[in-house]
Image: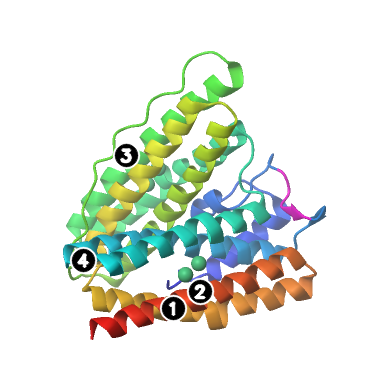
Amino acid sequence: MSHHPIRTLVVGLCALAATAAPATPALALAVPTGGQPTPHTAGRALQAQTIADLTTTMQGEAYAHAVYGLFAAEADRQGLPAVARLFRTTAQTELNEHLHEAATLLGVVGGNAANLRQAINGETYEHEVMYRRFADQARQDGDLEAAKLFSEIAADEGRHRDAFRTALAAVTTGHGTVPAPLKADVVSVPSGLPKVKAARTKANLDTAMHGEALAHAKYMLFAAHARQSGHPALARLWEGTAETELREHLAGEAVLAGLVRSTKENLSKAITGERHEATTLYPGFAEQATAAGDTAAARFFRDTAADEARHGAAFQKALDQLG
Ligand SMILES: [Fe+2]
Ligand SMILES: [Fe+2]
Ligand SMILES: [Fe+2]
Ligand SMILES: [Fe+2]
């Protein structure tokens, strides 16, 4: 999948890695924050560049997972179940293997309380800063539908933050209960053209979708940890919130962005993204990790590049068969 512009991301991450200061935005979700174990492998801290590259990896993989799910649904609507299956199995690899392994190398999943604090930081940023700014900008640019959606999502993120705060109190004091998740209002994403005009709105939708995809993926990891550690109610809160991030927030944004097109176009877009990852992005990350002496990360990037080459080839074959 195509990657979100990473310049600011990498700069922000290097700063974070150096200072362990309270994280900014989407990054808050991606980067281990203060109080969490330092990312490490083989007992040795990862170099800042490797941390930045693994974080970029998590963003891209979370986004690919989300987008392939939407492409699968479109293939089903077009009566192409084999293509739908290919998108779904590939989406699972992006999440359960690629993102999961990058998260493990980074040490993103901590204890239940640390995971809740990390999520509270991310939700607070989205609620107080990001979505309000995006709504204001969309209004200024005359994209009123987007302004309305961004405002609604801003309010939802405040509710997510509050639910996580209540859960944190229950987990840390043993008093009170973990709240049930709010029910997701599932949005379907048929193929269609963008419904926004301004370039700035389009860029903000792209940033927002990457943030939602990453939140979804991380909350699923946190849910697995909660369940394994004997906190089923907390697992349900993570899973229910993850569902809202993906199937309501990201989906609503995808409709306005015109993300889903015909299955042929979707396959072409997927092939471009996979080839970029296979030939440029991950080989580059592998070289940097090797130079930094982060050998486990280097091996992960090399293996992942090979997987992405297989994904690209499988999508190409599917496209050829559509004729
Ligand atoms: Fe991947
Ligand atoms: Fe949220
Ligand atoms: Fe969200
Ligand atoms: Fe892939």
Marks 1/2 in contact by CB < 8 Å: the verdict is yes
| Magenta residue span | 37-41
- Looking at the image, tell me whether mark 4 or mark 3 is earlier in sequence order: 3
Q: Residue at x 29, y 63 (%)?
A: 72
Residue 140 in sight: no
Where residue 233 appears, x then y in whole percent?
A: 46, 25
Please give the residue where the numbered disc 3 appears in the rendered image: 155
Residue 309 in sight: yes
Q: Nearer the viewer, mark 4 or mark 2?
A: 2
Spatial CA distance of label 1 from label 4 is 30 Å
Please give the residue where the numbered disc 2 appears in the rendered image: 308
User: Callout 3 environment at 10 Å: few (<14), some (14 to 19), or many (20+)?
Assistant: some
Marks 3/1 in contact by CB < 8 Å: the verdict is no
Q: Secondary structure at mark 3?
A: helix
Q: Secondary structure at mark 4?
A: loop
Spatial CA distance of label 1 from label 2 is 6 Å
Please give the residue where the numbered disc 1 appears in the rendered image: 312
Q: Is mark 1 within 8 Å of ligand 4?
A: yes
User: Callout 2 environment at 10 Å: few (<14), some (14 to 19), or many (20+)?
Assistant: many
- Looking at the image, tell me whether mark 4 or mark 2 is earlier in sequence order: 4
Residue type at numbered disc 2:
Glu
Residue type at numbered disc 4:
Val
